[in-house]
Amino acid sequence: MSDLVVGRIVGVEPHPGARAPSHLLTVDLGGRGRRTTTLPAGDYTAGELEGRQVVCALEGDDAVVLAAHARERGIVLLRPDREVNEGTPVA
């Protein structure tokens, strides 16, 4: 089972090897360290993503930034509605 935690996106770069336009993200997970993961570009620019808190699923060394795939909006990131510490568990 995956752990769900809050992380902060601290780095965003293009992901040139991806099949579809994607971002390569560095996410700070507080005491759990930093992880690198990918996210489909959708409507998000690098400037919009950097500094944003998001909900991540952790499985071993892998992290996945969670998002809803809304038909009318595309990718919509899941995130807390208030600032919390990075690494805070999601219940």
Image: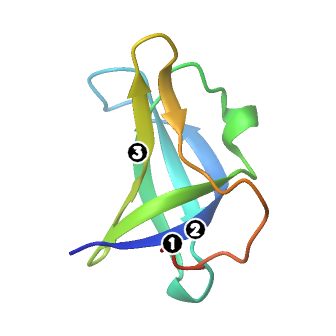
Give the residue number, with chain letter if any, for mark 1: 90
Query: Circle 3 — which element?
Result: strand
Disc 2, SS:
strand
Q: Assess whether mark 1 and mark 3 are in contact (beta carbons under 8 angstroms).
A: no
- Farthest left residue in view: 1
Position of 27 compared to 80: left or right? left
**Which labelled disc corresponds to residue 6?**
2
Around disc 2, counting alpha carbons within 10 Å, would you say few (fewer than 14), some (14 to 19), or many (20 or more)? many
Which numbered tag is attached to residue 38?
3
The residue lying at 66 percent from left, 75 percent from top is: 86
Labels 2 and 3: the sequence-earlier one: 2
Tell me if 51 is positioned left or right of 63 in this view: right
Answer above or below: position of 7 versus 53.
below
Label 3, label 1: how far apart the Cα atoms are: 21 Å
Quarter of the image where one finds residue 61: bottom left
Q: Which label lies toward us, 1 or 2?
A: 1
Mark 2 belongs to which amino acid? Val
Residue 45, image x and y in percent?
Answer: 66, 26
Query: Given the current orientation, which residue lies at the most extreme bottom position?
Result: 31
The reply to whether the C-beta atoms of the residues labelled 1 and 2 are less than 8 Å apart is: yes
49 vs 54: above or below: above
